[in-house]
Image (tube, rainbow, N blue to C red):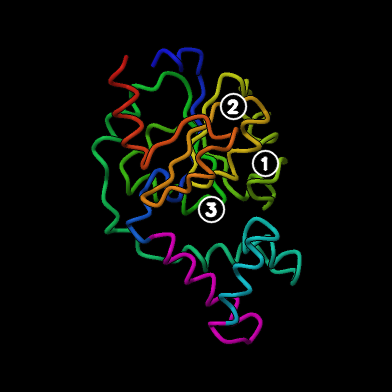
Amino acid sequence: MDKFRHIDTWVFDLDNTLYDAETGVFTKIGDRMTIYVADLLQVSQEEAGKLRKEYWKKYGTTLHGLMQEHKIDPDSFLVHAHDIDISDVPQCAVIKEYLTHLPGKKIVFTNSSRDFAARMTRQLGIDHHFEHMFTIEDAGFMPKPFAEPYHAIIEKFAFDPHHAVMFEDMEINLKTAAELGMTTVWLHGKDRDEAAAALPHVHYKAEKLADWLQHTIKKR
């Protein structure tokens, strides 16, 4: 932990970060988004899937794209997208134990809804570790990687980004964090993109959060 002695704030993404991609949760959410788009625009599931991906690439999230293109009610979208059963998502003993050893405040920073973030952290048995959550509602529905939510979370929870670490499964979301002075950890999953791994805003990397915690904290 020597390289992290100056850190007093730990910022965690939720999806595919605090829980693993292998759970299939985010795939289920994506499927729910596709159904929403298909129903809203009266198009096929295939066309809705293409549109969802186009909105994600252009606007950062499907929600933001739908708000810009179709003026939808964001709350109804979030309720629909996150209406999934997460009772079978397993808890990770490593994450539950090792989060305790990170000194300072811990924050969830997610493009997901407040209700889903609360439900998921409870299911994972780690909700007590997090003093704060900053969800898509707190960001005024402006998602990562846009700069606005990063500035907002820093202001809201009054931390120095030079003394903060951010954990993310999407390396693009770490770029703004690094530009603001945060140390970054990319959780790349099983299929690591070597070009992305070499980008200057990726400071540390691991397949999963549990891997990083075990590797790093054991060095204390």
Q: Quadrant of the N terminus?
A: top left
Query: How would you rate the neighbour count of disc 2 (Cα within 10 Å): few for under 14, some for 14-19, many for 20 or more?
Result: many
Between the C-alphas of marks 2 and 1, the distance is 14 Å
* In magenta stretch: residue 33: yes
Q: Quadrant of the C terminus?
A: top left
The residue shown at (69%, 68%) is 66
Name the amino acid, label 3. Ser
Q: Residue furthest left?
A: 93
Determine whether the residue tagged by mark 1 lies in a helix, strand or loop: helix
Quadrant of the rendered image containing residue 176:
top right
Q: Earlier in the sequence, mark 2 or mark 1?
A: 1
Left or right of 208, for residue 200: right
The residue where tag 3 is placed is 112
Question: How many numbered discs?
Answer: 3
The residue shown at (49%, 66%) is 30
The residue where tag 2 is placed is 182
Q: Find the magenta span and give its range.
A: 25-46
Q: Position of residue 53 (x, y in %)?
A: 60, 67
Pick the front one: 1 or 107: 1
**Which mark, residue 149?**
1
